[in-house]
Amino acid sequence: MIMSRTLTLVRHGESESNAAKRAAEKGKPFPQESQLMGVHTSERRLSDRGMEQAKQAGEWVRGFLAEQKGITVRGYVSPYVRAAETAGLMRLSIDWRIDPRLSERNWGDVDQMTQAERMRLFRRELDLRRQFALFWAPPGAGSESLMDVFLRLRDLDTTLEKRCSGMNVVLVCHGETMYAERFLREYWLPRDLRAAMESKDKRFDIHNCRIIQYSRFDAEGKEFPYYVRLRFIDPRDPMDPKRNADWMPIVRPVFSDDQLLEYASLHPRFLQAS
């Protein structure tokens, strides 16, 4: 099986949840925040700003697809309303398939809380999110780690290989889903995921409507059966070098015995042999 020609990941536009969180962090919580948190996270809409971001993302993706003459496009979207609304506003004029494997990480008890309640009850646990990266799960029953999301996406990857070979595929999903996608596509170690989540480099952050694109074609146009390059696009200003990263090769590491031992040696040993 051969992967799609390109895989384009798009994070949904700013949701009302994102806007409420940002306002609360600035000390000006929305009066309706409690009512918003009473709605299940999967049913929350985009903000006005998020709708505009979705249109900007659609403009960039349409421009790219217009250059891919004669290539079938297939779209998959998370069942969360904010992702579906983003996909619709992108106006790609394609048939979208809703796939629950693209859902946001389940945030357990935290999902229905205001920002103030989260900080009061779970500040310490939430502070560990980036440090423990792949293995951290939010407090509460049913919550997911990014390892859980990775396993969902690996299953989706099998579907894409079977059904989308030779196509251009667009996935509209969520920020942490995209981190798990990078972990899957780029053969990361857990430390690579942690570094990405902690990075302050604006070229690679996964803000609302960030676009990450993978390709099976290298810089010389040679075709491979797997993705060999990726790039990052900020549709608000695709030419800004501070917010975009042009095509980069994907390096899939393999390790010798000594390199594995060197990797282990980077971590402290707490129990010394007597």
Image: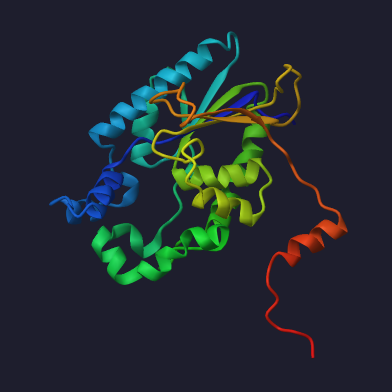
Q: Residue at x 36, y 31 (%)?
A: 86
Using the image as rendered, state which of residue 156 and residue 34 is in the foreground: 34
Q: Residue furthest left?
A: 31
- Tell me if residue 32 comes above or below residue 60 in the rendering: below
Residue 52: % across, % down: 29, 27
| Above or below: residue 21 compared with residue 223 | below
- Look at 68% across and 72% down and name the residue there: 268
Q: Tell whether 121 sits left or right of 67.
A: left
Above or below 274: residue 63: above
User: Which residue is most to the front?
Assistant: 242
Q: How many marks?
A: 0
Up the image or down, 185 lies above or below 274; here it is above
What residue is shown at x 76% (from left), y 19% (from top)?
222
Return the residue nearer the eye: 185 or 164. 185
Q: Position of residue 23 (x, y in %)?
A: 22, 49
Q: Report which quarter residue 263 is drawn in.
A: bottom right
Image quarter hosting the N terminus: top right
100 sits to left or right of 86: right
Q: Image quarter for residue 155? A: top right
Q: Position of residue 184 (x, y in %)?
A: 63, 45
